[in-house]
Image: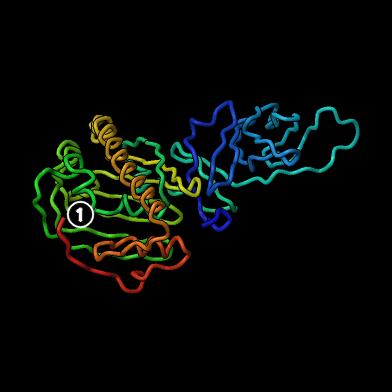
Amino acid sequence: MSDHKIEGWVAIAQSNAVRNKPLRVLVNGRGFVLFRADGKLSCLADICPHRSAPLSGGRVVNGTIECPYHGWRFNGAGACEAMPGLVGTMPRTLVPSYAVCEKDGLIFFSARAVDATPYTTVLAAGDTVSMTVESRVTSSLAEVAENILDATHTHFTHKGILRGLSAKRYKVTVTVTGGDGWVEARYVGEPKQEGLVSRLLEGERSISIGRFRYPGIAELEFWGAKSINLVTTFHLRQETDDTVHGFGILSGPRQRNLGYLKALLFKPFFRIALRQDQHILHAAERNRRLFGDRRQMMGPLDIMRPHIDAILAGQTPAVAENPAVLVMEL
């Protein structure tokens, strides 16, 4: 999926990563530069139209970004305001500019102007605690999104962290529904998991929900009897052909500041789980390249992947008209 087809907001950086210096980011292999000038955040194509130098290698000067090669300066709209050494009329020169905004500590980009504000997490408002973790993995966006939302791999990849060490499983009813640009699986009948994370941080569980939203948001909700205990929201983008960059937002209720302690405890476990996923995703991607263009089997428990693929292809998932209900053991 090329960036010119992306209609929604895509998280590309944390707000605190763009301060006094420009920042280069990649979306589907194309370079963009973020910079702040006169208190305003701007995003341009990271290429000077003169000799193709990356503008991100320059500096911010008087409300403009200065090219490190010949000093041409461009404002936030991409218009050239200075060509040092020129005497006389300056030719009209532009660098493509893009919509950009900030919300909940993240910077969002869109290749096209978007009226709506970005979605960050289901717990963006209210008396909650959140923290953000950044990661990269050698894979595709569809593979990473499926990995996050796949409940069946956790028994093996995350044994002891997310799942317990025993082989005991429970029958769970799963309902898969969807609509234009989204799909979700709702799990009923699974008790609190026996891994360290659940034992330390999660209360009793009534349901859990895995959801994918266009253009690259994978979200997990874990509910108690009356309210959400924990939410992890991953904002993913295809950074290059073989690299996915993501921001994981960990959210939970404040609980009279007990939520802060839980968040601090959860973060190191979350990083361990991320490394475990990075390892297996990287190994699988490397193996795919070794074996060439080999079609992957779609198993009966791969309940999200066909719909994720459809959404990324610009199609409505099949469960939008025909919701699916199945029973599995988790």
Q: Is residue 127 visible to us here? A: no
| Closer to the camera in the image, 48 or 253 | 48
Secondary structure category for the residue under label 1: strand
In the rendered structure, which amino acid carries the disc numbered 1? Answer: Ile
Name the residue rendered at 50%, 31% in the picture. Answer: 17
- Where is residue 94 drawn, in percent x and y? 74, 44
Name the residue rendered at 59%, 47% in the picture. Answer: 99
Q: Which residue is mark 1?
A: 207
Name the residue rendered at 43%, 39% in the picture. Answer: 104
| Closer to the camera in the image, 191 or 244 | 244
Colour treatment of the image:
rainbow
Seen as rendered, the residue at the extreme right is 88
- Residue 11 vertical placement versus 7 (above, below): above
Seen as rendered, the residue at the extreme bottom is 322
Q: Quadrant of residue 60?
A: top right
Q: Is residue 319 visible to us here? A: yes
- Where is residue 187 drawn, in percent x and y? 21, 58
Q: Residues within 10 Å of mark 1 (few under 14, many from 20)?
A: many
Task: Give the side of residue 248 with respect to residue 58, left or right.
Answer: left
- Where is residue 31 drawn, in percent x and y? 59, 42
- Where is residue 327 drawn, in percent x and y? 17, 65
Q: Looking at the rendering, in which quadrant would you find the C terminus?
A: bottom left
Name the residue rendered at 58%, 51% in the picture. Answer: 111
| Closer to the camera in the image, 307 or 180 | 307
Count of numbered circles on the image? 1
- Residue 239 vertical placement versus 292 (above, below): above
